[in-house]
Image: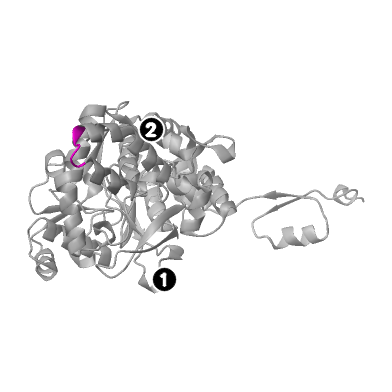
């Protein structure tokens, strides 16, 4: 008896471990490689139930459609006490809710600086005692339509970017960007940090508010789309976006405040990340529009507080699903190294949540000089994110990929099924309070945040 398999050249398909594929390649045997990975451990049953949910396809179509159609516009700059109704002695922070006892070094440093800035304490030791006593109320920025970079601390006297979604009507907020180095968001709280915050409250915020009253709202969706085609990815590289924002506002800044125009423009010009905070509020506005769609498995928030990494899912309301925040792998400043790094921190992963940042690294070859790796790694990172997302953004396009839209709308079911976790690029804060920034790099979220969300979806 003749077996057909042995009558001609074999046709081989390889998947999984690369050992067989490499052996065939050495023998010049033609093969078809399939990029297959097993689901995340322990998710098979929950994954089957979620994928079988008759609501899921339509719910995800609605959720991602809202995110893609959002039209964020920078409409104002206002004090937090006004727009967030923050009473004295209440501070917001990045990431899922956390208490002082579990707070990381950079978060503690930023809270100490905010207490001194607000006049609740005369110095750092007094501020630390005040915070440890529980006299200051802490809450997550995300619970107040707000996002904050790194430690993300917002106190009543800080001025906020106000972004309105012209399509869906939502509003989101983010603090103003201080620059790099020893700044509050990285946990520094020295005299120069407090002095800069006071100048931002007395000069920068009011000047920007007056300028926007003259210029009118700024179309952030269009600006982000342009910046992507100029080499930004809108998380760790915002040079083009900042330049576009300055170009848009400079005439109105001069008209609104000729006495302060030079110092305001000089400050923005020296801070390539100035646009980041406006872009974060834009991402928050779009993600919030996609919330609360029953049956949807799409992620609407990823955030870190320096201890925990948490996600929220459209179909699961305001519940947080968390795991331990990881330490980024990247490049360090000066004499700093991995031992100086705090685990990942900040709400700036709203950029990845909305299809930017690590998901758009193929648009920003220069970013690899900041976070490590090479251009091929950046392209591969973006390419892998199409496997776990629901759509491609119609406005946010990547020239190097033939103007393909950025991968947008993380699906926890696809994360579990492929075993591929979101790519996040990020700054690295020093683990000791008061240190400031020590580097930048890449980090992966904890798988358990996604697997626990999947289990909750399966039971919903």
> Tag 2 or tag 1, which sits nearer the N-term?
2
Q: Is residue 42 magenta?
A: no
Question: Percent from the top left, x then y, of residue 23?
Answer: 77, 62
By what rule are the colours in the image chosen? Answer: one colour
Q: In the depicted view, which residue is nearer to us: 412 or 250?
A: 250
Question: Percent from the top left, x then y, of residue 294?
Answer: 34, 35
Regarding mark 2 in the picture, which secondary structure is present there?
helix
Relative to 364, 211 lies left or right: left
Majority secondary structure in the magenta region: loop
> Relative to 68, does residue 270 appear above or below in the rendering?
below
Label 1 – label 2 distance at C-alpha: 36 Å
Residue drawn where x is 44% and y is 41% of the image: 355
Residue 409 occupies quadrant = top left
Residue reaching furthest to the right: 1
Regarding mark 1 in the picture, which secondary structure is present there?
helix
Residue of label 2: 221
Residue drawn where x is 26% and y is 59% of the image: 183
* Other-residue count near label 1 (Cα within 10 Å), few / some / many at <14 / 14–19 / ≥20: some
Residue 403 occupies quadrant = top right
Q: In the depicted view, which residue is nearer to us: 319 or 111?
A: 111
> Relative to 348, does residue 124 appear above or below in the rendering?
below
Q: In the depicted view, which residue is nearer to us: 370 or 155?
A: 370
* Other-residue count near label 2 (Cα within 10 Å), few / some / many at <14 / 14–19 / ≥20: many
Residue 23, can we see it? yes
Question: Percent from the top left, x then y, of residue 246?
Answer: 33, 38
Question: Percent from the top left, x then y, of residue 182?
Answer: 28, 62
Magenta residues, start to end: 256-260
> Relative to 406, does residue 89 appear above or below in the rendering?
below
Q: Which mark is residue 338?
A: 1
């Amino acid at each position: 008896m003749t077996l057909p398999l042995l009558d001609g050249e074999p046709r081989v398909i390889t998947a999984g471990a690369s050992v067989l594929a490499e052996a065939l390649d050495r023998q010049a045997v033609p093969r078809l490689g399939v990029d297959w990975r097993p689901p995340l451990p322990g998710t098979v049953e929950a994954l089957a139930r979620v994928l079988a949910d008759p609501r899921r396809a339509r719910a995800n179509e609605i959720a991602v459609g809202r995110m893609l159609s959002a039209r964020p516009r920078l409409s104002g700059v206002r004090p937090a006490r006004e727009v967030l109704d923050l009473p004295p002695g209440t501070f917001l922070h990045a990431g899922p809710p956390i208490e002082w006892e579990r707070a990381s070094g950079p978060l503690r440093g930023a809270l100490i600086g905010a207490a001194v800035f607000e006049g609740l304490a005369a110095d750092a030791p007094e501020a630390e005692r005040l915070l440890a006593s529980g006299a200051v109320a802490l809450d997550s920025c995300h619970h107040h339509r707000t996002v904050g970079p790194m430690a993300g601390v917002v106190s009543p006297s800080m001025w906020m970017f106000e972004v309105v979604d012209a399509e869906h009507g939502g509003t989101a907020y983010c603090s103003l960007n201080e620059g790099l180095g020893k700044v509050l968001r990285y946990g520094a709280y020295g005299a120069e940090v407090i002095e800069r915050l006071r100048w931002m409250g007395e000069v920068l915020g009011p000047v920007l508010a007056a300028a926007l009253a003259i210029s009118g709202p700024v179309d952030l969706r269009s600006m982000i789309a342009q910046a992507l085609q100029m080499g930004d990815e809108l998380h760790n590289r915002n040079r083009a976006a900042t330049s576009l924002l300055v170009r848009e506002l400079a005439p109105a800044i001069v008209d609104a405040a000729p006495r302060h125009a030079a110092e305001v423009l000089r400050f923005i010009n020296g801070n390539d990340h100035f646009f980041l905070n406006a872009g974060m509020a834009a991402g928050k506005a779009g993600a919030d529009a996609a919330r609360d769609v029953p049956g949807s498995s799409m992620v609407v928030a990823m955030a870190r507080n320096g201890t925990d990494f948490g996600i929220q899912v459209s179909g699961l309301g305001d519940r947080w699903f968390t795991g331990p925040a990881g330490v980024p792998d990247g490049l360090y400043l000066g004499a700093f190294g991995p031992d100086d790094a705090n685990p990942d921190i900040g709400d700036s992963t709203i950029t990845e949540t909305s299809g930017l940042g690590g998901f758009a690294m193929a648009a920003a070859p220069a970013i690899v000089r900041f976070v490590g790796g090479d251009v091929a790694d950046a392209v591969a990172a973006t390419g892998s994110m199409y496997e776990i997302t629901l759509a491609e953004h119609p406005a946010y396009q990547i020239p190097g990929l033939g103007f393909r839209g950025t991968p947008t709308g993380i699906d926890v079911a696809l994360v579990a099924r492929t075993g591929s976790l979101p790519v996040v690029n990020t700054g690295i804060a020093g683990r000791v309070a008061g240190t400031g920034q020590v580097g930048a790099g890449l980090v992966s979220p904890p798988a358990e945040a996604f697997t626990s969300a999947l289990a909750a979806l399966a039971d919903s």
